[in-house]
Image: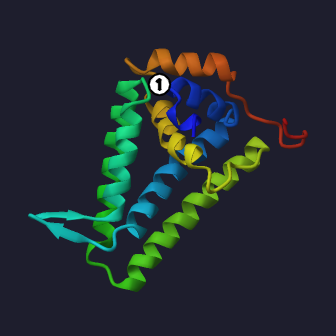
Amino acid sequence: MSMLLSPALDLLVPYAERHRDRRNIATHVVGVPLVVVAASVLLAHPAIEVAGWVGTPAWVIYTLAAAWYLTRGAFALGAATGLGLAVLVVVGQGAASDASVASWLGWGMGLLGFGGGLLLLGHYYEGRRPAKAGHLVALLVAPLFVTLELLGAVRPWRHLFDEVERLAGPTILRDLAQPAPR
């Protein structure tokens, strides 16, 4: 539970240490958003309308995650991550809103399988196993990491990006013929 309350830098550095191969990072930049959209599709039901607002389990989880991102001590990164996730949730909810059960499950499971497959491919390049599926902190940090990777060259994120890279080490292209790091 204490990791869940850690500041962004303390969460990002260990995550980045396990994601140094540039091919792994690239697969995460695509795969993590696909998994978020898939989760949003799968959590689009049941939908409950209250006073003109439609609420779903995806929006409840999004709201909790966005609040968590904003409280990790890197407000600009938390806000950017929350905004990015909101867009992905809207896309997922839109895909599931008027879909038949078969289409809803097909899109959700298909995107989850494709996104998850990309993440597994990335970890093959890295030479490390991914975090356990039930590891809540890793699931929350992944979008934060991807957001920082996408915005790291831009102010106000550059300083945090540089600090994570300094502490985690530079990115590499691992020689796949060599044993994986431990």
User: Where does label 1 land, which residue?
Assistant: 152
The N terminus sits in image quarter = top right
Q: Nearer the viewer, residue 122 or 58?
A: 58
Give the farthest residue toward the left.
51
In the figure, residue 98 lies in which quadrant? bottom left
| Mark 1 nearby-residue class (10 Å; few <14, some 14–19, many ≥20) | some
Image quarter of residue 157: top left
How many badges with numbers are in the image?
A: 1
* Image coordinates for residue 117, horizontal then vertical, percent: 63, 60
On the picture, is 136 further left or further right than 22?
A: left
Residue 113 at what x, y percent from top left?
Answer: 57, 66
Please tell me which residue lies in front, 134 or 173: 134
134 with respect to 65 (left or right): right
What SS does tag 1 mark?
loop
Q: How far across and how far down the image is residue 122, in percent? A: 67, 48
Q: Residue 57 or 102: which is nearer the viewer?
A: 57
Give left or right: position of 177 versus 119: right
The amino acid marked with disc number 1 is Gly
Q: Residue 7: x, y in percent?
A: 50, 26
Who's the residue at 70% across and 36% down the image?
Answer: 18
Q: Which residue is at a point 83% across and 37% down the rendered structure image?
A: 175
